[in-house]
Amino acid sequence: MPGNAPGSCDGRMHLAPFDPWTATADGERHRAYAALAARGPVHRVQLPGGPMAWLVTSRDAARAALTHPGLSKGGPARAPYAGELPPGIAAAINHHMLAMDPPDHTRLRKLVSAAFTRRRTEALAPGIQQLADDLLDRLAEQDEADLITAVAYPLPIAVICRLLGVPDGDHHLFREWTAPLVVGGDMAGVEAFTAAASALVTYVRELLAEKRRRPADDLLSALVAVRDGGDQLSEDELTSMVYLLLLAGHETTVNLIGNGVLALLTHPDQLARLRAEPERLPAAVEELLRFDGPLQSAIPAIATEPVELAGVPIPEGANVVVGLLAANRDPDRFDITREPPGHLAFGHGVHHCLGAPLARLEGRIALGSLIARFPDLRLAVPPAEIVRTPGFLMNGLAALPVRLR
């Protein structure tokens, strides 16, 4: 979409050399959002695939948008390719919490929260540490590695699969399936999206059938059994929830780890501070989430009535996108000693990420173990050669080549 770029708050379009979704070169994406934010808090833009929308780039306006009663997720019908997917597949992936407004969202979140307990999350800590140690052990004899392939991807997918109860031998299947599904918007192409969604739904349905036959101490079995009085998750709600947990439960953490390591390696003073004061690790993870978070945008909403954000009037029926990456990047300076900034990396309001405690736990273990194990860790290429993956929702690295010693 070069040339179809951000506009001013009055809706007039302005040309720009790049957009944030297809910007992949080092720093280009953040510069795109900074240029937008410098013009104002709310902008008229063209989204991937052609539709127009209002993009929110300031933290205050983003908070307001994420809780505004006049902005609706719109339900399953507004999901990517919803009208082009086979009906059974569309229903099986789009009846999840992020697509719903209250009261449907409230009901689903209550049912899922009953299974996705803090106890279940905290019990994963020793296993996550062991997984991280095993992955780092495999690097012991290597001088260089791609940390995305070696650590940032395999750790979160193993964790979410173990939490759900996916057999260890099946973890590798999800990387191919999820890649087209997490791009967001209409950027994957309907054929690739349909093939990936169909394969994932088929697998999940078979796994759910197995959990009904042989329940285990895992989240899938708990979701099958969870009830609130006479209420329980329907079959489409079950498959949609597993779909959401698999995607949101691992891809965001991949980006948290990858972006976090990159930020530390390109800010050696902050890395040195963290090595000297490891007790700052929880605060460092929060600053990493703020400074270069795993998500670019929240799932788009639609204005169900005329809405005003930061003084900008938005008409009924308009698409509204909260630019999380832009809203969080104020101030534009990485500092692990910063007081808790109240970032929006996990969203805000009723859609605040249910898995945020798990992502934080994985981030602390992965980053802490990595910098402790490899005191000479550094980039293997100049920062200018680091490339981001294109996408509407996610903000991640295609690869992160490092020298380990």
Image: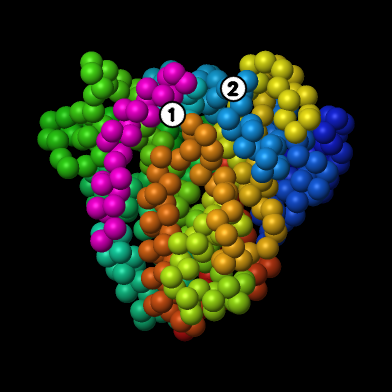
Q: Which residue is drawn at 82% across and 33% down?
A: 9
Do the numbered discs 2 and 1 sit on residues whose CB atoms are within 8 Å?
no
Q: In this view, does 202 lie above or below 168?
A: above
Question: What are the residue bounds of the magenta stretch?
Answer: 102-126
Front residue of 202/98: it is: 98
In percent of width and height, residue 308 lies at 73, 25
Does residue 11 appear in this view?
A: yes
Does residue 46 appear in this view?
A: no
Q: Which residue is drawn at 31% across and 28% down?
A: 111
Residue on which disc 2 sits: 69
When asked about the image quadrant of residue 178, the answer is: top left
Q: Residue at x 54, y 76 (%)?
A: 273
Q: Residue at x 29, y 52 (%)?
A: 122
Dominant secondary structure of the residues highlighted in magenta in the image: helix
Q: Is residue 69 above or below residue 8?
A: above
In reply to whether residue 392 is colored magenta, the answer given is no
Residue on which disc 1 sits: 97
